[in-house]
């Protein structure tokens, strides 16, 4: 009995240790974050878009500029990239960061023109969590536990961002597939009953995930109670709504809602990730609810945008796909964006695949032809141009009451978090930071920084002084490194 108790205790300790959330004060737990400076993937990504003609000759080149310190922040959650089939979560040391960075660049990197970008690494649920179709209580609970573990990391990362970096700025949430699920959970937990955050939310863009529902005849009432689905594309852009869609190849046959879907899983309700399980009578399943202006008759896709095969720049193709909005008979109330290819002679277009699957990035990608039956991985790329067109108006229409006042801290420099285990932010909106110098308590110079976001992760724990030189004044603050 003692031996059995020891084994069980070990299992409990292991489970509890894994359940602990990640420390998002540490820079290494972020893919994109202003404090990363030269290693911030969002800053490194080239935002040049080369639009090509059907014969692949260059039509035009557009140079988007990276964000300044605008009053808009983007928080993105990447999709499932761990393809292991056993159920479980990937630990932080095993994350395929190369693939995660590639997916960021492919899906949402071009949006860095609109604001600062925050992308956490997280212990996502492995592919096996979604492939397991058992509806037994134990399997349902195991799935819910894996998803909850992943979401808790996202919640922790967003809470860190909100506490130390948001400062009332507008927020754009973005996610794909599993990432879109976590964005929806984030809306449920953080935004749906918080009027202040609702006012800051520009839009939540949830791509490629079918698990959304609303009360029939309404834009809300199912997955969320207060955050609404965005209104039709031809309406005045609405601030604070959720937009979701899903694309499929013309030859794909959509299936019904799987009985193992988390919308039938009661443990997601008890864990507070969703309000209620799916009601097949009163709920309308909202898959690809937003149609981007496409109709039930095929019309040309204005511009397909993807990262090029060198993973350096963006490439666009105009009017080389056809799109229509198609209902899904097996999913009540659902539609999806049906994509058809307009073939050209010697068509060399490719849809990039994860770098995990191809050793040579210069020859990566799947040819766009009729043999490709599922476009789920590329949900973002088909609507990039449409989203780029919609976002400016949505940002302009969002006027949160909590926006920072540039005159509020004319004579102050706020340093946080303090104490810190790594990341430090100096907030002084009314003055330009010239330099920030770090000294130990003996007055010995340690290091100099030149932006208001920096990291002391490599410094020894203890107390320091920082001298902040702006274009108007000098400030001295004490900083504690844990």
Image (cartoon, grey):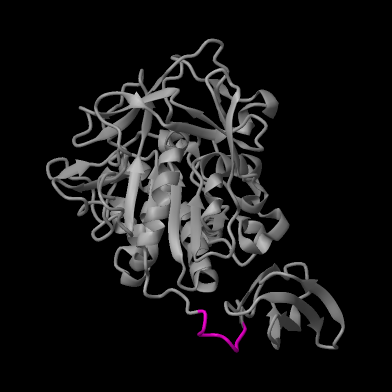
Q: Specify whether 102 is left or right of 228.
A: right
> Which residue is rendered at x = 48% and y = 45% of the image?
125
Provide residue 337's location: percent of width, then percent of height. Answer: 33, 31
> What span is in magenta?
406-413
Which residue occupies the extreme top position in the image?
345
Task: Assign the C terminus to one quadrant of the image.
Answer: bottom right
Tell me if residue 4 can be seen. Answer: no
Provide residue 435's location: percent of width, then percent of height. Answer: 75, 75
Above or below residue 352? Residue 158 is below
Q: Does the magenta-highlighted stretch encompass residue 410? A: yes
In which quarter of the view is residue 366 placed?
top right
Which residue occupies the foreground of this view, 380 or 52?
52
How many numbered discs sit on the rendered protein? 0
> Which residue is rendered at x = 43% and y = 17% of the image?
342
Tell me if residue 22 can be seen. Answer: yes
> Which residue is rendered at x = 55% and y = 39% of the image?
106
Which residue occupies the foreground of this view, 277 or 226?
226
Q: Main secondary structure of the magenta part?
A: loop
Which residue occupies the foreground of this view, 86 or 364?
364
Q: Specify whether 77 is left or right of 263.
A: right
Provide residue 243's location: percent of width, then percent of height. Answer: 34, 47
Q: Specify whether 200 is left or right of 350.
A: left
Provide residue 306's location: percent of width, then percent of height. Answer: 54, 34
């Amino acid at each position: 009995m003692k031996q059995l108790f020891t084994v069980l205790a070990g299992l409990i300790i292991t489970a509890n240790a894994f359940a602990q959330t990640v420390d998002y004060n540490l820079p290494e737990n972020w893919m994109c974050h202003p404090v990363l400076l030269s290693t911030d993937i969002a800053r490194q990504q080239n935002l040049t878009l080369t639009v090509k003609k059907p014969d692949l000759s260059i039509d035009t080149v557009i140079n988007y500029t990276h964000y300044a310190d605008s009053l808009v922040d983007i928080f993105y959650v990447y999709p499932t990239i761990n393809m292991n089939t056993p159920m479980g979560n990937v630990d932080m040391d095993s994350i395929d960061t190369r693939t995660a960075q590639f997916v960021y660049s492919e899906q949402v990197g071009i949006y860095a023109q609109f604001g600062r970008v925050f992308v956490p690494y997280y212990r996502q649920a492995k592919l096996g969590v979604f492939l397991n179709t058992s509806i037994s209580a134990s399997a349902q609970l195991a799935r819910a536990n894996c998803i909850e573990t992943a979401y808790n990391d996202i919640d922790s990362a967003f809470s860190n961002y909100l506490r130390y970096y948001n400062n009332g700025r507008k927020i754009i949430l973005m996610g794909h597939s599993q990432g879109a699920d976590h964005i929806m959970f984030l809306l449920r937990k953080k935004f749906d009953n918080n009027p202040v955050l609702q006012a800051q939310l520009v839009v939540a863009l949830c791509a490629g995930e079918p698990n959304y529902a609303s009360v029939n005849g309404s834009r809300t009432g199912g997955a969320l109670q207060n955050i609404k689905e965005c209104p039709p594309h031809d309406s005045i852009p609405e601030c604070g709504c959720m937009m979701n869609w899903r694309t499929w190849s013309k030859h794909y046959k959509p299936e019904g809602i799987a009985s193992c879907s988390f919308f039938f899983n009661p443990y997601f309700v008890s864990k507070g990730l969703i309000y209620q399980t799916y009601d097949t009578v009163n709920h309308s399943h909202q898959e690809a609810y937003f149609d981007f202006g496409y109709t039930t008759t095929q019309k040309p896709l204005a511009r397909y945008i993807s990262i090029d095969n060198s993973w350096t720049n963006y490439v666009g193709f105009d009017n080389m796909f056809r799109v229509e909005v198609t209902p899904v008979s097996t999913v009540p109330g659902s539609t999806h964006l049906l994509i058809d290819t307009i073939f050209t002679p010697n068509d060399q277009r490719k849809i990039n695949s994860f770098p995990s699957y191809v050793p040579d990035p210069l020859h990566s990608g799947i040819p766009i032809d009729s043999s490709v039956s599922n476009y789920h991985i590329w949900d973002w790329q088909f609507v990039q141009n449409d989203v780029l067109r919609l976002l400016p108006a949505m940002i302009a229409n969002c006027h949160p009451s909590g926006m920072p006042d540039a005159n509020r801290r004319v004579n102050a420099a706020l340093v946080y978090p303090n104490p810190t285990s790594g990341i430090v932010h100096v907030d002084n909106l009314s003055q330009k930071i010239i330099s920030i110098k770090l000294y130990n308590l003996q007055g010995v110079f340690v290091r100099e920084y030149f932006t208001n976001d920096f990291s002391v992760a490599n410094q020894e724990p203890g107390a320091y002084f920082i001298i902040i030189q702006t274009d108007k004044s000098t400030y001295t603050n004490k900083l504690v490194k844990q």
